[in-house]
Amino acid sequence: MQNTEEYSGEIVAVEVPDGERSHLAAVYLIIDHGRVAVIDTASNTSVPHILAALARRDVKPEAVEWVILTHLHLDHAGGAGSLMCALPRAKLVVHPIGVPHLVNPVRLWEATVSVYGAEQAFRLYGRLVPVDEARMVAAQEGLELALGERTLCIMEAPGHARHHIVVWDEPSQSFFTGDAFGLSCRKFDVDGRAFIFPTTSFSQFDPHEMLHSIGRMLAFGPRAMFLSHHGRVGDIERLGADTCRLIYAQMAVAEAARGQGLARHVEILAGLEQLVREECVRQQWALDEEASLEELRFDLSLNAQGLGMWLDRSHKRELAARGSAA
């Protein structure tokens, strides 16, 4: 596995295993005049990769000033407590909603077990280590973090989750997006032309908020997006249009589904698989239809669950509104 990829010397992607996915994820290091920020931590299994990447650049753990979590999902934040134990000066930056869940990760763990089961959850993420609240910074909208001679700016970006943030880096004119701009697997690229696919996974997915967050990011005119899944992508105008189009397409798939529970989930999943087949042809991916489906199978299952939960919340709001009107 290629462990790191450098972008202009100041931004490094540390490639790490990505849970059940067959492709990789990226944890980012931003290095400025010897000071470092880490964007997301992935799971506990990623921590040795991060520390090794720092050591290869002769960066001591004491030089890491910020560990910034885009959101609390454990494929982004599961290793936060373990990593903080190894970085004595670092502050952990997370959305205010996330602070109590990292101080006491019991509810975070219970939510993960409810999805995967205890055995698989432990296999994927290991033991969650609490973080001392005194070492945490609540990532409010507009928060600015000094790093060497640059400033990182925090922007709230709900949609994938209510507690999602993104990080604007002025020198590179780029966002570090977590899951707010979708996922992109390099195996699909043709001649460096990337694709994008929105991630609508549970449990707080809201398509309208996600579209609004994407619009706010695009308004900056970014040169690139650094995706957690996975790597830097350019051609942002095209990819921004694609991800918005595909959010609407996934909404349409979900709204067309009938039935409840497992039957509805299966119908939504089948609709998403057909959408992938159409995109494979439309965008002329490097992988054929069946290989594309296999590569995205885990994400499509999560997307179908997230869309189902969004439908349930929408129906509850409609019923509540009717009751109020009556």
Image (cartoon, grey):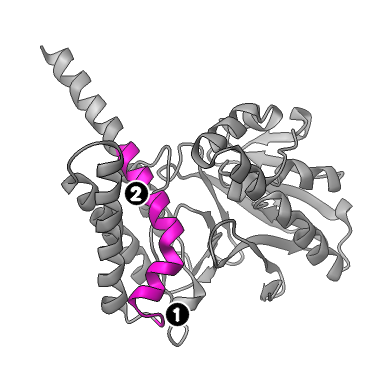
Q: Is residue 82 left or right of residue 137?
A: right
Q: Image height check: is 176 above or below 22? A: above
Q: Residue at x 25, y 64 (%)?
A: 274
Question: Where does residue 116 sit, x and y in percent of width and height?
Answer: 53, 42
Q: Residue at x 53, y 61 (%)?
A: 21
Question: Where does residue 182 sit, x and y in percent of width and height?
Answer: 43, 58
How would you classify the magenta stretch by its main secondary structure?
helix
Q: Residues within 10 Å of mark 1 (few under 14, many from 20)?
A: some
Using the rendered view, name the quadrant where residue 240 is placed. Answer: bottom left
**What's the amino acid at mark 1?**
Asp
The magenta stretch spans residue 309 = yes
Q: Is residue 55 left or right of residue 13?
A: right
In the image, the segment drawn in magenta is 286-310
Q: Residue at x 63, y 45 (%)?
A: 77
The magenta stretch spans residue 80 = no
Residue 182 visible somewhere in the drawing: no
Q: Residue at x 25, y 43 (%)?
A: 264
Question: Where does residue 18 sit, x and y in percent of width and height?
Answer: 59, 59
The mark that comes first in sequence, 2 or 1, is: 1
Residue under circle 1?
189
Question: Where does residue 141 sit, x and y in percent of width and height?
Answer: 53, 39
